[in-house]
Image: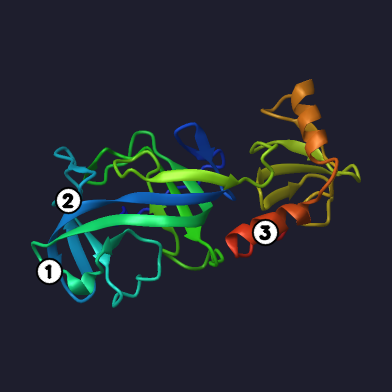
Amino acid sequence: MDRPTDKPEPSPQGVGSGVVRFRPGDVVMLECPFTEVTVTAVNRYHVSVRWPWSQVDPLAESYRWNGDMALPTPEDQDWDRLYFRTEPMAGALKAGDHCLVGIAPTVVHVVATHHFDPPLITGMLPRPTSYVEVLPQGEDYDPELEDQTFTFDPAGGEPIRLDLIFRPYAFLEAGDVVADCHGYAWRFDAAWDWHSLDGGRTVAPDWPLALLNRDDRPPTSGDATSVARATAAGSHAEEVRRWTKLTLAKPAIQQR
């Protein structure tokens, strides 16, 4: 899908879809029901279809969209990325044909989230207020690669369904400060993004953890108890193992 070229800054708090606010590290089942569309053009690398879920934004002067979406064929270099697919595949289609477009159920992990205020102008309606970047099972995130991730609006026109499977460190919130079992203080920004505040020498704190600060103030007794109970057993390594088993990928653990 065509997206603006300017890359937005990630939002550590995550973005929402329904009642779930997704954040980096989340493992999610993603799918979009297959819907009948009309093929408008076919070439070696792309099949274009009339997009059924979005409308042309008449006030978008910088981005002119004609209502079609170009999807890659197996000949395109981006074919192996996570994209909407046609049924039947492009080789059996020609302009004027009807086909189905959707995304088969796929396990993905969230790499980054972005928030836009005001909503982003893309030439399409609705204008997105957020994007989620994901990678499919078996693919490690490489910050040196451009356009590696699949990016979409979780609250956009497409009826994309996102079901949270696993959230590492679900008992913590971005910005929490904890003390590890050695007494070192750490700030939690994301599952694989820990910042040592006073000399911790590893990439993450050793459990059990004590919650010291949440939302820039001392935690409630309930929040502190919840973190203590959640980390009474287990470890950072166990969170990594659970995540890796689902994603078949290596977490992008920050080296400090």
Amino acid carrying label 3: it is: Ile
Residue at 43% of width from left, 55% of height from top? Answer: 105
The residue beneath circle 2 is 65
Residue density around tag 3, few if under 14, some if 14–19, many if 20 or more, within 10 Å: some
Distance (Cα) linking label 2 and label 3: 39 Å
The picture places residue 255, in percent across and down from the top left corner, at: 70, 60
Q: Nearer the viewer, mark 2 or mark 1?
A: 1
Distance (Cα) linking label 1 and label 3: 46 Å
Q: Which residue is at the far left?
A: 96
Distance (Cα) linking label 2 and label 1: 22 Å
Q: Is residue 152 above or below residue 43?
A: above
Instruction: Return the mark for residue 253.
Output: 3
Q: Is residue 75 above or below residue 181?
A: below
Which image quadrant is residue 184 in? top right
Instruction: Return the mark for residue 94.
Output: 1
Which image quadrant is residue 130 in? top left
In the rendered image, which quarter contains the N terminus? Answer: bottom left
The picture places residue 106, in percent across and down from the top left corner, at: 46, 57
Q: Which secondary structure, mark 1?
A: loop
Q: Of 3 and 81, which appears nearest the observer?
A: 81
Amino acid carrying label 2: it is: Trp
Amino acid carrying label 1: it is: Lys
Which of pointers 2 and 3 lies earlier in the amino acid sequence?
A: 2
Q: Nearer the viewer, mark 1 or mark 3?
A: 1
Specify the color scheme.
rainbow
Instruction: Return the mark for residue 254.
Output: none
Residue at 66% of width from left, 37% of height from top? Answer: 175
Q: Which secondary structure, mark 2?
A: loop
Q: Is residue 2 visible?
A: no
Which of pointers 2 and 1 lies earlier in the amino acid sequence?
A: 2
